[in-house]
Amino acid sequence: MSLEHWEAYYRGGALATCPTSPEGGYDLELREVWRDFFAPLPAQARLLDIGTGNGAVALIAAETAAALGRRWEIHATDLAQIDPPRHVPGGAERFSGITFHPGVATEQLPFPEAHFDAVSGQYALEYSDTARALAELARVLKPGARAQFVLHHAESRLVLTGKVSQREAELVFNELRVYRRLRKLLAGERMSADAAQRAGVEVQSAIRALKLALPQAQQSGGGRMLAVTLDAVRKLMEMRAEARPELVGLEIDRAENELRAGVRRLNDLVVHACSNERMTELEGQAATAGFEVLERVPQYHAGANLVGWRLVLRRA
């Protein structure tokens, strides 16, 4: 799994990945399961949030502690080079009291044995070498301490939407070759009127194909990638009348790279989503590492929207 596209995503300031509240964090049932997990912890507890990204779950922990009048020591790790206080709007204030550890693998944590009272992780554990990660988490947890994880579900709405977007990406990049046609138009305009006209016809053909595909994709619960591409193409076509060709070329590169990064994030999600059989395997790994499995249930959000598995473990 490449980290570059995740690091670019987090530098953009998004607090969470999916699904999110208007404030950018997890809400509704997802927020409640985390509040319920954190609330029983003692006044001086130490917490570890793995795969924290921009700290959405760590922030819920801090807000829960504040609401209960407790002072928890909260650490948050991620393999990516994250910096939530810098990149999230208002991050310096929002994350006050949370210690972030960028570039840290869950399989090799920089903490002593029996150090934490709880471990959390949302859309995190499944991206690791789970057997090694669980052994390491067992090492840093105190005996009797609990861990809770929300993991991607192979049949969740997020994964199904991701697969629709993967098919849309195939259309954009490989079938219609939208960005390649835009570059050909830019080059054609430098060569001759005839070359520009031919390239322009190809671009317009791609635009028509995208517009035809969009309603069908939306009926299947998708369409976002097609809509983003159409909007980018419109802006790039308008930009040609105002900016130098080299600047337009750079903007074409930027738009394509951003979309490809989004596709890589979706691919990571789909590949690492857990089937029922995978969760059974993961439970066996947890038992080998020294955990007791307390609960494994589907996790829903906003009613009937399946968004993952919730796995609760206790250190023996």
Image: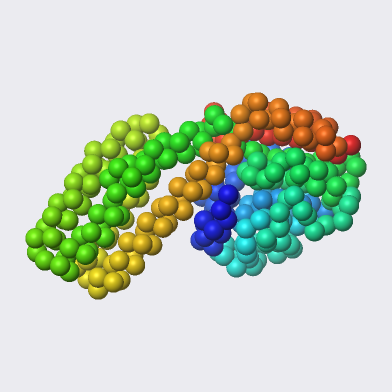
Q: Which of the 4 image quadrants contains residue 272?
A: top right
Q: Which of the 4 image quadrants contains residue 286?
A: top right
Q: Is residue 68 above or below residue 307?
A: below
Q: Is residue 243 above or below residue 314?
A: below
Could you tell me if residue 5 is visible in this image?
yes
Toward the bottom, the furthest residue is 244
Q: Is residue 108 left or right of residue 4?
A: right
Toward the left, the furthest residue is 194
* Quadrant of the frame with the C terminus: top right
Could you say which is closer to the camera, residue 39 or residue 262? 262
Q: Is residue 186 left or right of residue 316?
A: left
The residue that appears at 30% across and 71% down in the rendered structure is: 247
Q: Is residue 34 left or right of residue 21?
A: right
Residue 240 location (% of width, % of height): 22, 66
Could you say which is closer to the camera, residue 242 or residue 133? 133
The residue that appears at 71% across and 41% down in the rendered structure is: 130
Could you tell me if residue 41 is visible in this image?
no
Residue 163 location (% of width, % of height): 45, 36
Residue 255 location (% of width, % of height): 37, 59
Could you say which is closer to the camera, residue 7 or residue 58? 7
The residue that appears at 80% across and 47% down in the rendered structure is: 136
Q: Which of the 4 image quadrants contains residue 66?
A: bottom right
The residue that appears at 64% across and 44% down in the rendered structure is: 127
